């Protein structure tokens, strides 16, 4: 600083620098902690998760450095969250630069496909989270995948085997849809999806969250190699648990399919620090893991943003 600078000007400049630094630390502390760079698109958020408001969802996004997010309704509430597509569209119209609206409707109703077409006209960009207690080979599931194929849309599907699960039968039936409907981008999510990271998949009745070393040759590796229209949603405890159970395997898994992993959180916290969620933020912990396992900045950029935009737009 020049010795000739007046005390008043020097004091003003110092105060301004201190204020700016403080604002940057307050705004970017979580992002700094995770070393995130570039835009971040969260492929899996619900605006009312744990009764979170729309504004608190935006606060969560700001705190975690999230530029945009797919907002996924859950019309039936069968998974513990009830979120109407109309509410998602309302949130979108309040924050068009941040939120990307998906739609969802109960596929067991006879007007499900007509509703999806109507939501398309209203500005929705995909279907998800598709989550009803029906097996994957149910014709009503296929009808929704078929309309997504027609609309050139992605669909986020919750795969959970077991008596009270959703879209049961991934191992037996998913490949049929990938072959039959090459235009649709199927985004896989949840327990049974991630259990198939390994060739050794326990019975769902015994464990939906397998631990320990991953046995190479899992179904996901093969399907993602053969079908570029298949994407992996890394969100929630199921995604993080699978990706951390054998980090050496995961590093290679990410390297083998660099264009098919989508960063997602499914996080219900309000502030990026786990407020209202026992001090845990799925977004920040996954960002930290990706920085640890993926050294190439371009591949990180693909996971954090580019792959989701490809899945969205085709």
Image (cartoon, rainbow, N blue to C red):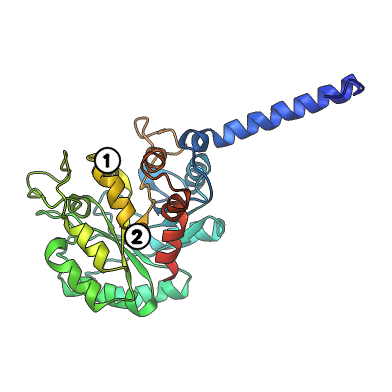
Q: Which residue lies furthest to the bottom in this view?
A: 150
Residue 121, position in %: x, y?
46, 76
Q: Which residue is drawn at 33% across and 52% down?
A: 255
In the figure, 247 relative to 67: above or below?
Answer: above
Number of numbered callouts drawn: 2
Query: What element does badge 2 sit on?
Result: loop
Residue 238, position in %: x, y?
25, 46
Q: Which of 77 and 207 is in front in this view?
A: 207
Mark toward the viewer: 2 or 1: 1
In the figure, 152 relative to 233: above or below?
Answer: below
Horizontal placement of 86 versus 169: left or right? Answer: right
Query: What element does badge 1 sit on?
Result: helix
In the figure, 54 relative to 244: above or below?
Answer: below
Residue to which mark 2 is pinned = 260
Residue 210, position in %: x, y?
15, 43
Q: Nearer the viewer, residue 123 or 12?
A: 12
Residue to which mark 1 is pinned = 247
Q: Nearer the viewer, residue 296 or 39?
A: 296
Looking at the rendering, which quadrant does residue 128 occupy? Answer: bottom left
Q: Residues within 10 Å of mark 2 (few under 14, many from 20)?
A: many
- Residue 239 visible (yes or no): no
Comes first in the chain, label 2 or label 1:
1
Horizontal placement of 218 versus 181: left or right? Answer: left
Q: How crowded is mark 1: few (under 14 residues within 10 Å), some or many (20 or more)?
A: some
Q: Which of 127 and 3 is in front in this view?
A: 3
Residue 265, position in %: x, y?
37, 47
Q: Residue at x 53, y 43 (%)?
A: 62
């Amino acid at each position: 600083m020049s010795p000739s600078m007046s005390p008043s000007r020097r004091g003003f400049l110092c105060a301004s620098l201190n204020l700016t630094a403080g604002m940057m630390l307050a705004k970017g502390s979580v992002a700094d902690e995770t070393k995130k760079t570039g835009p971040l698109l969260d492929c899996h958020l619900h605006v009312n998760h744990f009764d979170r408001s729309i504004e608190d969802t935006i606060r969560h996004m700001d705190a975690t450095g999230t530029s945009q997010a797919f907002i996924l309704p859950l019309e039936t509430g069968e998974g513990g969250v009830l979120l109407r597509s109309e509410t998602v569209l309302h949130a979108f119209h309040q924050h068009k630069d941040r939120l990307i609206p998906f739609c969802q409707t109960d596929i067991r109703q006879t007007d499900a496909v007509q509703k999806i077409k109507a939501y398309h006209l209203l500005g929705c960009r995909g279907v998800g989270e598709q989550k009803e207690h029906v097996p994957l080979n149910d014709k009503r599931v296929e009808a929704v995948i078929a309309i997504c194929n027609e609309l050139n849309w992605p669909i986020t599907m919750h795969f959970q085997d077991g008596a009270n699960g959703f879209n049961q039968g991934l191992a037996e039936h998913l490949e049929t849809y990938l072959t039959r409907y090459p235009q649709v981008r199927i985004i896989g999510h949840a327990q049974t999806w991630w259990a198939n990271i390994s060739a050794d998949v326990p019975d769902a009745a015994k464990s939906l969250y397998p631990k320990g070393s991953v046995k190479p040759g899992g179904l996901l590796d093969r399907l993602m190699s053969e079908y570029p229209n298949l994407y992996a949603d890394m969100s929630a405890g199921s995604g993080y648990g699978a990706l951390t159970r054998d980090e050496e395997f995961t590093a290679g898994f990410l390297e083998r399919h660099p264009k098919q992993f989508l960063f997602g959180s499914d996080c219900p916290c309000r502030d990026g620090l786990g407020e209202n969620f026992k001090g845990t933020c799925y977004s920040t912990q996954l960002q930290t893991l990706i920085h640890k396992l993926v050294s190439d900045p371009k591949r990180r950029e693909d996971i954090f943003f580019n792959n989701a935009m490809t899945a969205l737009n085709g």
